Amino acid sequence: MWEHRCKVALSGVGFSRVTRSAEVPLAAHALEAVKGAVEDSGLAMSDIDGLATYPELPATGHAVVDGVTIVSVNCMMAMLKLPNLSWHVQVETVNIGGAVQQAANALLAGVCRYAVVWRAMHNPKGTYQNLPGTHANGPTQFTAPYGFGGPGQGMAVAYTRWLERHNQNREKMATLAVTQRRHSHKNPHAYFCGQPLTREDYLKSRMVAYPFCLYDCDIPVQGAVAIVLTTADRARDLRPRPAYLAGYGQRLAFEVAGRIGSLSSYMEGGRSSSRLTWERSGFSPKDVDVAQIYDGFSASVIYGLESYGFCKEGEALDFIQDGRMELDGELPLNTFGGSLSTGRIHGLWHIIEGALQASGRAGERQVKDVNVSFVGASAPIVQGTTFIFVREPY
Amino acid sequence: MTMSDWSAVTRPIPVPNELTRPFWDSARQGVLALQRCQACGAFQHPPYATCVKCMAIDLKFEPVSGKGAIYAYTIMYHAGDRRFAAAIPYASIIVELDDAPGALLAANLLEAPYTEAKVGRRVEVVFEPLNDDITLPQFLLARDTT
């Protein structure tokens, strides 16, 4: 087990308003979320001395304008002018989960005391994927000429392989979309809070990239979420009950750029990340009381459930049936609604919900008697990270 | 009718680089050639600086037969990529060649209804010239399915 388990805790959480597309500069959303997280902790902004983010703009073909389409660490430093700032980082290969892990490492190393991590996501007005180019450079030279224009297709090809190899039926995925949407009605920050989705809506919805229909894809939005991380001893003195970080892991094998469609890459990615998390925390899938598994596209949940070890390969779509993912089910899953219902804010929201469930702060959607709370914070193939938060240190 | 109409599609033209130029040079001559590790014999695609299996740097492009099977596919219904809007719905496929297990090539399934795309379906390479320099490997359903 990890000698540093439960020595770092997630304290405050913050949310910006979420709009369908950009109405105000993204920096305003990031600032709102960061202020919210600091206030939730009961800290003053001047207490914050660490900053971390993953600022990537997923909408391809749009200009990167700091403060407008991304919010970098530099941008946040310029806005906050923190008098005690002592550490910051901006990660690339490990997505937002990696920023959280780096902040935990910095706290453990004693180079900062209260770290803020945010994820701000831009949705440009008009076309999300702006692909007007006449040429295909770099890794896209083997994909773009064939009409592989976005991440949805890259994920869809692995999904057809999964479905046909395991003789499975995509209609079973309706349970995931519908149940998550129902969960989101208890999450006032979710984009789709209060908007019902039925099984019939799912089954009749238009196809985007087969096997993905509209409700298999998270909706692009503009918004931000943020957290305060600190050491466990400091967290105990703050207002919210802490969620203790029991262990984490990250994907260890990276795919060669431009190689797409490999189902085994998802599985290897998820296995490598979760193995570290299980080993470091000392827990196994059967110990988990509640799980948040990244769902930018619905099939990521399948690869997560199987590669993290919650069920056998080929069985994930059966696993989520029969009420198993309900708030009172065997494995309550994506209890905040997931990205499919909150909108595309990436995995920091999964991390937030994992921590809120561990600390008993999930409100109406709180799962009973949670101690072990699992998070898979991005698709296992791309920059996958995994976490376990617990209610009680051990 | 479930045939995709490719006539109004303007495909983006691949720009070869140091690693990929031999692939495109061969394709222009109607030969499918993939990068092969001279140490362990593994084929790989897309090309990379080292063998992703054994880390050797002695890699050469060698011709392969062009027969294989659909490893995975998607049918694209969304016109988000305007360049391909005229062809939707269309099948984008991933092919694993008999000669090069593990090397995965993206392509389209041409001259067949897009509904014919299925995992495991036998396919064979065909070459689609884009201009004088660049010819795209593409795939058809195999005539001989044995």
Image (cartoon, rainbow, N blue to C red):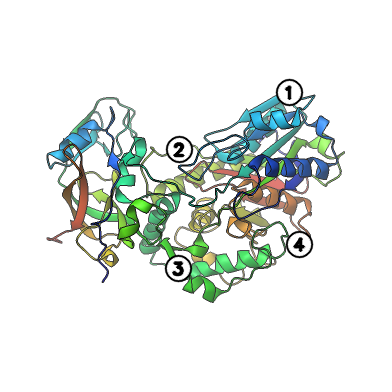
- Residue tagged by mark 3? A206
Residue designated by label 2: A253
**Amino acid at pointer 4:** Lys
- Residue type at mark 1 is Ser
Same chain, marks 4 and 2? yes
| Image location of residue A67, percent across then percent down | 63, 36
Label 4 packing within 10 angstroms: few (<14), some (14-19), many (20+):
few
Mark closest to the chain's N terminus, 1 or 4: 1
Q: Quadrant of the C terminus of chain A?
A: top right
Secondary structure beneath dot 1 equals: loop
Q: Which residue is mark 1?
A: A86
Q: Are marks 3 and 2 on the same chain?
A: yes
Q: Is residue A209 left or right of residue B7?
A: right
Above/below status of A213 relative to A91? below
Which chain is mark 2 on?
Answer: A
**Left or right of A81 on screen, residue B82:** left
* Above or below: residue A42 compared with residue A211: above
Q: Residue furthest bottom?
A: A200
Q: Chain of mark 4?
A: A
Chain hosting mark 1 = A
Q: Residues within 10 Å of mark 3 (few under 14, many from 20)?
A: some
Residue B112 sits in quarter? bottom left
